[in-house]
Each structure stands twice: as C-alpha cells, then as structure tokens.
Image (cartoon, coloured by chain):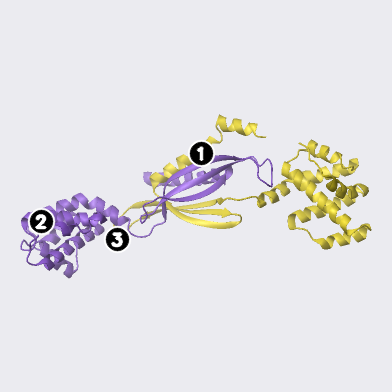
Chain colours: A yellow, B purple
C-alpha cells in the first residue's frame, strides 16, 4: 500500500527538500512534540526567524510532516512502502533515510496516541477477590454460606469504575470454565485461519 | 429456645381448643407456615371460613403468636426438642406439639432459604455470556488486528425478579488475566474444602 499525497501537501513539504537533513530532523522533533501535546504557534516564529523564511512556510512544513507521520502510522506502512511513498516528494537520499528512521522510531508511539482517540468501551482493568463464609445475619443465625466477593475494576476512556459482585462456589467454577473456553476459542483452527487471512 | 412473654402468651392461645378447635388446628398451622413462606398467601388465614370462634381477636393473636414462633425458630435453627419444650411451656397438648413439630421440620429448609435472602447483598453472579470479535480497524487507525471479548455477567439480586447485566470488554491478555485470577480463586476454594 502506498500513501497518496495531494498537491497542496506536496507543496507544503517541498520547503523541506531545500534544507539540510539536520533541519529536517529538527522539524520532525517538533512535529512529534506537536503530535504528543498539540501545536504551539510560538515555536513557528522562532524557527522562521532562524531560517529566515515565512512563518507560514515553517507552519506548513511542520504540519505536512505531522500528516505524513500520522497517516503512515495509521496505515501501518512497512519500511518499503514508506520509502516508496516519499520517493515522489523530491527528498535526497540522506533525508529519506532520516525520515524513515524517524517514522520507524515513532510509529508505535503515534499508534498509541491514535488508539487513545478511538472509541472506547468499558473494559476490564483488574479483578480482586476474596473468600468469605457468612456465619449469621439479622434474620438467620447459624449459617455457613460460602461466598466469593469480587471487586471488578473497569475503565472507560480513562474513567475508572469499580463494581462489587459476589458469587457462590458452584457459579465460580461455572464462570471460570465458560471464560476459559472463550479464551481457548481464539486458539481454535477456525479463528486462527481468519486471523491469518485478515492482514 | 426463648420467646418474649407477649409472644408466649399469644402462642398459648393457639394451643387452646376453645379458640382453635381440634378439627381446624392442622389447617391453621398449615396456613401459618404457608403465609410466612409464600408472600402471595400472606392473608390466606382470611379464607379459613370454619373459624366460628366467639373471640376473633384471640384467633388473630394466636395466629400472630404461631407465626412469630415459626420465624424465630427458623432464624435460630431451633431443633425439635427445644421447640417441643417451648410448646409444652405454652401448654400445648401432645398431639398439637406433634403437628407443629412435623410441619416445622418439613418447612424448615424453605424458611431458612427465605430468611437467608433477607438483607442487602452485592449482585450475585449466576451466569456469563461472551462474544469474540476480531477488531480490524477504526476511523483513526488501520490494522488494529486484535481479539476483543465482550463479556456479560448475569447477576441476580434477592429483591429483583429479572436478571441484571454487567458488561465490559477485554483484550485477549486481559481475559487471560481475569481467567487466571478466577482459577486462583477456584484453587483456593478447593484447598479449603479438602482441608
């Protein structure tokens, strides 16, 4: 799979073909910083003065790189596809190598950031359990009722929640058995075949 | 087994054949037990038409005394001997003691299940449903490619007829973690039940 660039995007990045790989590296550093924390226009002015160019040029250069890095990470481009994709942008060999290194170094982090933006369901975080034997209550003395208490920690878009649940030994065994079967299902030939075929 | 004096006095009335004739006593006892166990039959006593006592207030009190005794005995897990001696103290004739003891013995497990369900407990897990999805991509990212389980725990509360649900998702690793912890709990129970 190759990344397609629009003309406007190519134009924005063309500024970077005229500078040294060190400057490209610095732009990449700034781009990563912005991907992590959001943009900060003050930095554009400083860089523009130093390089003696328009603020807009710097601005477009950084945004072009941010787009390049996020889009490639989004598509999970492999090494060869990434190199082929940037071939058309007019960078020299050294700069292309620099871009590739930066892409490979940061792909994991960018995907983590992207995954934080995706829709989230309440998901499992932790389970604490304890075993109690209920001996008496106000309405019934002399019991020996075994109970397993659970504190289920879940998380939804960073918001943590806990649920207190209980069960008895028979249901605990049942619960464990059914969920273990669910886990084994992923290892079944059918699921493995599907997984192999979705690339 | 001990009861407060007022309850003992009421129970004494239930043993007297002036208030509850011998012929009606078995159904009187039956209705008292049913009324405790089954909330739909709580007022079944009203349908016992044969009661032609001159003193309806005494019948009412006798019923209250018997019901209080039934609940208290089940709550304390009282055995037949101490129940009998209590009824003797309340001047029950032997055949009535036998009638009450037998009915008590028969209904004790149901009474104790009912009493055990009184009070607040956390939601009780009775079943679980799961669904396995393969998460392929989303609007921000391609090639996510990981297994996602959707787990629904079915829970029960004594006060509610319908089952409730607790739903959450988890990745394969998270489910591994969850199952591992549940297995630990199972092992712990096994050890305790063997020791």
Residue carrying label 2: B25
- Label annotation for residue A149: none
Residue carrying label 3: A139
- Label annotation for residue A182: 1
In front of the other: label 3 or label 1? 1
* Residue A146 drawn at (x, y percent): 37, 51
Q: Are marks 3 and 1 on the same chain?
A: yes
Q: At 51% across and 57% down in the image, what residue appears?
A: A162
Task: State the residue lying farthest toward the bottom.
Answer: B6
Classify residue A74 by image quadrant: top right
Measured in 3D between alpha carbons, the distance from the residue under mark 1 to the one under mark 2, in whole angstroms, is 58 Å
SS under mark 1: helix
B172 or A59, which lies in front? A59
SS under mark 3: loop
Looking at the figure, which quarter contains the N terminus of chain A? top right
Q: At 91% across and 46% down in the image, what residue appears?
A: A17
Mark 1 surroundings within 10 Å by alpha-carbon count, few (fewer than 14), some (14 through 19), many (20 or more): many
Classify residue A36 by image quadrant: bottom right
Question: Which of the chains bears the disc numbered 1?
Answer: A
In the image, residue A125 sits, relative to residue B92, either above or below, namely above
């Amino acid at each position: 799979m190759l990344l397609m660039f629009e003309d406007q995007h190519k134009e924005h990045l063309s500024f970077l073909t005229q500078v040294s790989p060190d400057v490209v590296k610095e732009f990449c550093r700034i781009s990563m910083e912005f991907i992590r924390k959001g943009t900060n226009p003050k930095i554009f002015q400083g860089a523009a003065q130093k390089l003696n160019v328009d603020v807009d040029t710097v601005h477009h250069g950084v945004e072009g790189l941010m787009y390049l890095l996020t889009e490639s990470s989004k598509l999970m481009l492999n090494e060869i596809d990434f190199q082929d994709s940037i071939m058309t942008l007019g960078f020299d060999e050294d700069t292309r190598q620099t871009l590739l290194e930066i892409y490979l170094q940061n792909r994991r982090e960018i995907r983590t950031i992207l995954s934080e933006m995706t829709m989230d369901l309440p998901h499992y975080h932790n389970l604490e359990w304890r075993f109690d034997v209920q001996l008496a209550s106000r309405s019934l003395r002399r019991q020996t009722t075994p109970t397993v208490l659970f504190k289920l920690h879940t998380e939804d878009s960073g918001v943590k929640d806990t649920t207190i649940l209980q069960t008895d030994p028979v249901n605990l065994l049942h619960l464990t058995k059914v969920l273990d079967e669910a886990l084994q299902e992923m290892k079944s030939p059918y699921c493995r075949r599907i997984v192999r075929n979705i690339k | 087994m001990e009861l407060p004096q007022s309850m003992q006095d009421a129970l004494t009335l239930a043993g007297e054949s002036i208030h509850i004739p011998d012929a009606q006593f078995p159904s009187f006892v039956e209705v008292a037990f049913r009324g405790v166990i089954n909330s739909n039959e709580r007022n079944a006593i009203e349908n016992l038409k044969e009661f032609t006592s001159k003193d309806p207030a005494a019948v009412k009190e006798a019923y209250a005394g018997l019901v209080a005794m039934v609940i208290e005995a089940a709550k304390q897990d009282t055995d037949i001997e101490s129940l009998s001696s209590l009824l003797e103290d309340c001047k029950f004739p032997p055949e009535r003691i036998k009638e009450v003891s037998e009915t008590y013995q028969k209904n004790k497990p149901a009474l104790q299940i009912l009493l055990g369900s009184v009070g607040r407990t956390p939601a009780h897990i009775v079943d679980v449903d799961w669904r396995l999805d393969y998460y392929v991509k989303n609007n921000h990212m391609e090639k996510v490619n990981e297994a996602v389980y959707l787990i629904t725990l079915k829970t029960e509360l004594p006060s509610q007829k319908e089952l409730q649900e607790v739903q959450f998702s988890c990745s394969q690793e998270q489910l591994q973690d969850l199952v591992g912890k549940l297995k630990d709990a199972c092992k712990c129970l096994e050890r305790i039940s063997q020791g």
